Image: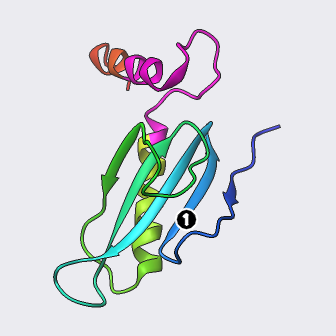
Amino acid sequence: MSPVNLEVKTDWDSHERSVGPVKGYYLALCACETAEGPGRFVGYYKVCTDPPAGYWEAAGLLKGCTDPPRRHAHLALRDAEQAARQEVGRLPATGGAGLRQGPVGMLEDYLLGLRRGRV
């Protein structure tokens, strides 16, 4: 049976959310207005090994942002989730046989895969 991806319900700000597990990882997502003025949002993501308590508190294994800016926060969040899922697709599943444990081990496995052309 394949694992089900569930959104983790939180009391975070309305422009933040968490999704997971995705291949054993959790995605902390945030949409912030840009300096271009009101109504222009960019999405940010962090890929975490544990369920995050909030976007800003999360210590992500990987992080990034989206471009171009969107007119609505929910669209920026959607873009951030898609980008985070792409990054997770390049990582080994957590808890798999032969993987080193913890964020450092996962990052080492990922970088080793890059060097060997497997990622």
The number of numbered discs placed on residues in the rendered structure image is 1
Residue type beneath disc 1 = Arg
Decide: is 59 above or below 37: above
Q: Residue at x 32, y 80 (%)?
A: 70
Is residue 82 visible to the viewer in this orientation of the structure? yes
Q: What kind of element bears circle 1?
A: strand
Q: Say whether residue 51 is left or right of residue 76.
A: right
Q: Residue at x 39, y 71 (%)?
A: 31
Q: Residue at x 28, y 84 (%)?
A: 40
Q: Residue at x 76, y 39 (%)?
A: 2
Q: Say whether residue 24 is left or right of residue 44.
A: right
Residue sticking out furthest to the right: 1
Give residue 36's position: percent from left, percent from top.
16, 84
Q: Say whether residue 62 is left or right of residue 105.
A: left
Is residue 118 visible to the viewer in this orientation of the structure? no
Q: 86 or 106, which is in the foreground?
A: 106
Is residue 43 magenta-colored?
no
Q: How is the image coloured?
A: rainbow
Decide: is 54 above or below 59: below
In which image quadrant can residue 6 be found? bottom right
Mark 1, residue position: 17
Residue sticking out furthest to the bottom: 38
The magenta span reads: 88-110
Q: 94 or 60, which is in the foreground?
A: 60
In which image quadrant can residue 30 be found? bottom left
In which image quadrant can residue 56 be found? bottom left
Give residue 63's position: percent from left, percent from top.
35, 47
Decide: is 53 above or below 23: below
Give residue 32's position: percent from left, percent from top.
34, 73
Is residue 96 magenta-colored?
yes
